[in-house]
Every structure is written in structure tokens, then in C-alpha cells.
Image: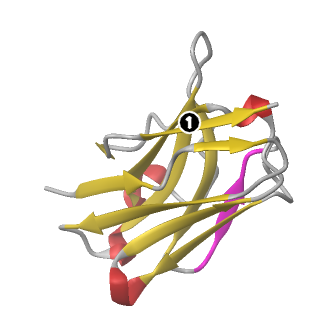
Amino acid sequence: DVQLQASGGGLVQAGGSLRLSCAVSGFTFDDYAIGWFRQAPGKEREGVSCINSDGKTYYGDSVKGRFTISYGNAKNTMYLQMNSLKPEDTAAYYCAAGARQFVGDRWSPLGYEYDYWGQGTLVTVSS
């Protein structure tokens, strides 16, 4: 029922910036947590950042201080501003939504509590 579409990925040099977008439909923000996850070849999926309608945000240790998550309610769009990109940020980035009753107000390192996923957008950072 909930649908998410990620966009904005691409190729960027180390030290550069990208802004990812995720259009969300079919949900009431108050009832969900939404966020970004990524997966690189040969590695586990990891949480990047998440946000809820209270404005509470979380960030993975590897992106703290470099990435910023936000949500534009009027546009039903979640954003991830990525600055100071590193080659190790190279991954497929997915936006996701999970019911607040299951996700809770806490960090999800792997995203198993999230039920709805977008198609992903590829970010490649060259050295």
C-alpha cells in the first residue's frame, strides 16, 4: 500500500555531494518511521538515517556529520543530503517505511522492522 520511489543517485568524486530524494505515498507520516538504508556488494545492509513525524532523527556512525535527513510534508518527499562523500559510501541506497508500532522510536541498524521499500538508487563515489 505504501509506495516509495528513490532518485538522485549518480557518480560523484570523493569529497563531492549528492542529494537523494524519496517520494512517499499511501501513508500517514504519524504512523510510520521512514529512512534510508544502503547495501554495497559483499556487505550487509546498513542503516544510514531515519526520521519520524516528531522530527527525531538517527544516523549511522559512518555518516554522522556528513549526511542530513529531512522530510518535506507538503511534497511527501524525504531527502538525504550527502556531503563529503567517500568511496566507501558507494552502495545502492534504498528508502523505506515501517510502522511506528514496530519500529519504535529507536535506531534500526539493519531495517528488518521496515515493511515497505523503494527500488533503490545507485551512488558511486570515485577516488
* Residue pictured at 54% horizontal, 41% vertical: 37
Residue 59 shown in magenta? yes
Q: Which residues are magenta?
A: 55-60
Q: Is residue 94 left or right of residue 68?
A: left
Q: Which residue is mark 1?
A: 38
Q: Is residue 19 magenta?
A: no
Residue at 57% from the left image edge and 58% from the top image edge? 50
Relative to 111, is 45 above or below? above
Q: Does dot 1 land on a helix, a strand or a loop? A: strand
In the displayed structure image, the side of residue 63 where residue 110 appears, left or right: left
Residue occupying image coordinates x 64% and y 46%: 48
Tell me the quadrant of the picture where the C terminus can be found: top right
Label 1 Cα crowd, 10 Å radius (few <14 / some 14-19 / many 20+): many
**Identity of the amino acid at label 1?**
Arg
In the image as oriented, which residue stretches furthest toward the left? 1
The residue sitting at the top extreme is: 42
Q: Residue furthest bottom?
A: 74
Residue 96, percent across and down? Answer: 40, 49
Image coordinates of residue 104 in percent, x first then y, are 51, 57
Most foreground residue, 98 or 63: 63
Instruction: Please tell me which residue is depicted at 74% across the width and 32% down the height of the picture.
Output: 126
Residue 80 percent coordinates (x, y)? 59, 62
- On screen, 127 above or below 100? above
